């Protein structure tokens, strides 16, 4: 699968001096967590920022980054002179969601020569309209996903319509419907309010709304399996979104009195735990996903990833007693979940698992 820049990057990485490696990241999304983790283990660090968005990294958290590259726009990271600077620093780049969106998959796959920690060809699977995407992988892996509706006319139960905002296409303006009439009425309202447009609606995914507690399950897939094992489970989180959670914080009678378009723009995360009796469902889903990625996108998934889903009653159980883990989104790169480190009990267990390595680097805990 190492076409495009993959083969060249592999050769470049093999020529790096392991003692001189710099960990690089785009200044957005999860850059702080990458910076603090890399510094804790003694790596040099690099952040690539866009003018006007650099203060968090180049000013307030400058201690996390040894090197700062400031660009007019994020996509300028593809320029040869910028890449040469990163290669001179022996940079291993950590991809996040902002990197995928602002730099673009074609550029990442074919023009970005800097070695990446991860599989650059899996990043594109996050797009709902791409061929062989995350849903295709989930189905092929035999992981439970919500029922998909190809046409609004087929809606016969509560669904969520995953449509992006018109003016902020990276953010969500999801809405809910329980019938075709409900769908068209709400879609028309959002179009009139200039929240979504027809093009976004055509690309939207309509799927059954899973009535269960949401869990974002975060994992680390190891490339050095002989040394670390296959993967580690890091913990759960869920999201806070605006203006959705602002509306939900109101009493029900007051929610009914307001008429504002609901948006699902992610603004924060919080940690969760799960009953131990149900956690094997999540481990099994991760194993299935890792296996199918190795088969379809060799060498498979490497590094951090997340399966975003919910625990609900299994639709295949006629007695509705058995629970199942339904996955409705995948993050095939660093999830933006900084709460996992300080809130997840799994991190305490992993600190025990890797205590000999941590001591070697003078690190107290993960």
Image (cartoon, grey):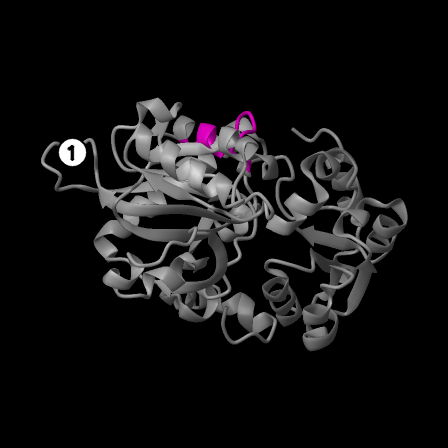
**Would you place residue 120 above or below residue 344 in this image?**
above
What residue is shown with label 1?
317
Q: Nearer the viewer, residue 204 or 299?
A: 204
Counting every numbered tag in the picture gives: 1
* Residue 353 visible, this angle: no
Q: Name the residue located 60 percent from the left edge and 58 percent from the top edge.
A: 29
Where is residue 138? Give x, y as percent.
42, 32
Residue 72 at x, y percent in the picture: 82, 55
**Identity of the residue drawn at 72% across and 36% down:** 6
Please state, as top left, top right, bottom left or bottom right, where the N terminus lies in the image: top right
Residue 129 located within the stretch drawn in magenta: yes
Dividing the picture into quarters, in which one does residue 183 lie?
top left
Magenta residues? 127-138
Judge whether 300 appears above or below 217 on screen.
above
Q: Is residue 36 one of those drawn in magenta?
A: no
Classify residue 316 by image quadrant: top left
In the figure, is residue 5 to the left or right of 131? Answer: right
Query: Residue at image x 16%, y 41%?
Result: 322
Element at badge 1? loop
Relative to 1, does residue 328 appear above or below in the rendering? below
**Observer-nearest residue: 124 or 45?**
124
Q: Residue 206 sits in which quadrant?
A: top left
């Amino acid at each position: 699968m190492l076409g495009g820049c993959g083969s060249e990057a592999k050769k470049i990485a093999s020529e790096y001096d392991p003692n001189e490696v710099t960990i690089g990241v785009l200044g957005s999304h999860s850059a702080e967590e990458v910076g603090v983790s890399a510094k804790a283990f003694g790596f040099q660090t690099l952040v690539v920022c866009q003018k006007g968005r650099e203060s968090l990294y180049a000013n307030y958290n400058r201690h996390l980054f040894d090197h700062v590259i400031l660009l007019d726009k994020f996509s300028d990271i593809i320029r040869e002179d910028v890449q040469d600077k990163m290669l001179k620093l022996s940079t291993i780049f950590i991809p996040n969601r902002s990197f995928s969106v602002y730099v673009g998959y074609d550029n990442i796959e074919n023009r970005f020569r800097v070695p990446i920690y991860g599989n650059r060809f899996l990043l594109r699977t996050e797009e709902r309209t791409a061929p062989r995407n995350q849903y295709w992988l989930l189905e092929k892996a035999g992981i439970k996903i919500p029922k998909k509706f190809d046409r609004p006319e087929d809606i016969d139960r509560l669904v969520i319509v995953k449509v992006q905002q018109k003016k902020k296409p990276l953010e969500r303006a999801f809405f809910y419907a329980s019938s075709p009439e409900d769908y068209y009425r709400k879609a028309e309202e959002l179009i009139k309010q200039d929240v979504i447009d027809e093009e976004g609606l055509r690309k939207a995914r309509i799927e059954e709304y899973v009535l269960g507690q949401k869990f974002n399950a975060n994992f680390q897939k190891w490339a050095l399996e002989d040394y670390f094992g296959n993967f580690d489970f890091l913990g759960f989180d869920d999201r806070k979104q605006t203006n959705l959670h602002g509306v939900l914080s109101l009493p029900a009678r007051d929610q009914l009195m307001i008429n504002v378009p609901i948006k699902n723009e992610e603004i924060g995360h919080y940690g969760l735990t799960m009953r131990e009796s149900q956690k094997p469902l999540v481990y099994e889903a991760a194993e299935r996903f890792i296996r199918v990625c190795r088969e379809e996108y060799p060498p498979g998934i490497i590094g951090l990833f997340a399966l975003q889903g919910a625990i609900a009653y299994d639709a295949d159980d006629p007695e509705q007693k058995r629970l199942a883990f339904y996955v409705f989104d995948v993050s095939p790169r660093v999830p933006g979940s900084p709460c996992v480190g300080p809130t997840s009990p799994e991190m305490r267990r992993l600190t025990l698992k890797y205590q000999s390595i941590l001591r070697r680097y003078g690190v107290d805990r993960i």
